[in-house]
Image (cartoon, grey):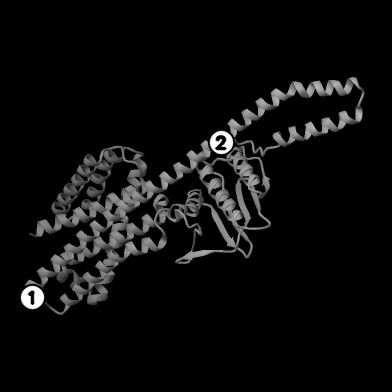
Amino acid sequence: MYMLEGYITVLFETFILKVFFDTFLKQPNLPDKRTYSLFFLISIINFALSTLLSEYFFIKEIGVILATFFILLLYKRGNWKKILTLTVIFYGILIITDYITLFIEYTVYGEAEIALEETGILIILLDKIVLLLLVLILKAIFDRSEVAVLEDKDWIKMSVFPLFSIGMIVAMLSQEKYGMTERLGELFLIIAFGLVAINVVMFVILRDILARETFIRDAQIYTIETQNKLNHYKTLSKSIEKQRSISHEYKNQLNVIQGLCNRNNIDELKIYLEEINGKVREDLDRIDTHHSIVNTVINEKYSEALSLGIAFVCKIGDMSTLTMEDKDIVTLLSNILNNAIEACKKVETKKIIKLKFVCEEKAVILSCKNSYDGNIRKRDGELVTTKSNRSKEHGYGLKNIIQIVEKYDGDYVIQPGEKDFLIAISFRQR
């Protein structure tokens, strides 16, 4: 029975190890079945080493680290230096949890040595749950792909159960201090192992939620990209048709000019040329940032805003040095300008959008200030959409903007005023 209990704790520790490595080393090169087989192998080898070398602490720890390292090389097939570093860091965190557990023991018993004699497997399970809590904290801090999906309050909710489990085991240890029957001790062990099992189940549920939310977000971003490409093609189609029309009229315009010259009507010729020149300039004066993707998005939104009677004021710099991924540019600009246009459509007078997008030295600055009706909705202290149709879908707009900003380690400010709504973003070029 003691051997089974010991192996379950090692298996739980190996599960936490997988969570840790999946946080810092993405995209394993192996299928799921082989992945779990390798971690199962790690648990068996580590349990055997811990059992056989229990009296030789340092030799046992070095053996466990090396065994874990070589098997993880098969799992990740990545940079061996990084894998070795992460392996050492993980077992370093494990040592830290040992000291945290010892502190809890001392708090409960007053004497750590007495606690070790009396607590047995409960202390080991407490140690592993503390380890899980620390790894979850690291995941919330460093795994940006998932931080963007789950908000801080969601991570707090998910950490409640490990904290509850720690409190329950500490309570059971406190009871053991005053003595208890063998049957009650067995009941406590069953409860403790049940808490471990539920922690694993809760984390699996968390992982499934993250996968689903990531899929929804990626699908929504893909929809935005597709719509912008479609709008771009429509714009090109209109430009081509317009160019054909201009080419068709070109001969007629030359005939008129030739006729005015023949009749020596210089004044009428000047007026006619100014009229033609104005139309040509109107067709050619488009925003050019020296970046095709930025041009496509801004020019499309510029045309859309003008067609709706919205004034569009721009301060756009040379974006040829912009290093953002194309899909991130589309997501960021489209969401910001879509929100600005939608807000201006609800305003009766003074519809205006002011956009600034510049690269200054190594910094990128993007700000958008637009008119709006002053109607702001908040849920749990955060801004939400005021659109009545498909509100759940539209709710991803601001989250997508924040996700991109955090991906590039940037900063953002959102300031809703009485008549103007401002969003400003800045980040350093990579």
Judge left or right: residue 376 versus residue 73: right
Task: Categorize mark 2 by other alpha carbons within 10 Å: few (<14), some (14-19), many (20+).
Answer: some
Indicate the secondary structure of the residue bearing disc 2: helix
Q: Give the x, y percent position of residue 169.
A: 21, 69
Judge left or right: residue 148 versus residue 35: right
Q: What amino acid is found at the position of numbered circle 1 in the picture?
A: Thr
Indicate the secondary structure of the residue bearing disc 1: loop
Mark seen at residue 316 = none
Q: Foreground mark, 2 or 1?
A: 2
Q: Nearer the viewer, residue 33 or 418?
A: 418
Q: Give the x, y percent position of residue 184.
A: 10, 73
Q: Residue at x 17, y 62 (%)?
A: 193
Quadrant position of residue 113: bottom left
Q: Residue at x 18, y 57 (%)?
A: 9
**Residue linked to disc 2:** 232
Earlier-in-chain disc, 2 versus 1: 1
Task: Categorize mark 1 by other alpha carbons within 10 Å: few (<14), some (14-19), many (20+).
Answer: few
Q: Give the x, y percent position of residue 148.
A: 43, 53
Q: What amino acid is found at the position of numbered circle 2 in the picture?
A: His
Judge left or right: residue 186 versus residue 16: left
**Residue linked to disc 1:** 181
Q: Residue at x 56, y 34 (%)?
A: 234
Q: Residue at x 23, y 72 (%)?
A: 170
Q: Give the x, y percent position of residue 307.
A: 64, 44
Mark 2–mark 1 Cα distance, whole angstroms, equals 76 Å
Q: Is residue 107 visible?
A: yes
Q: How many marks?
A: 2
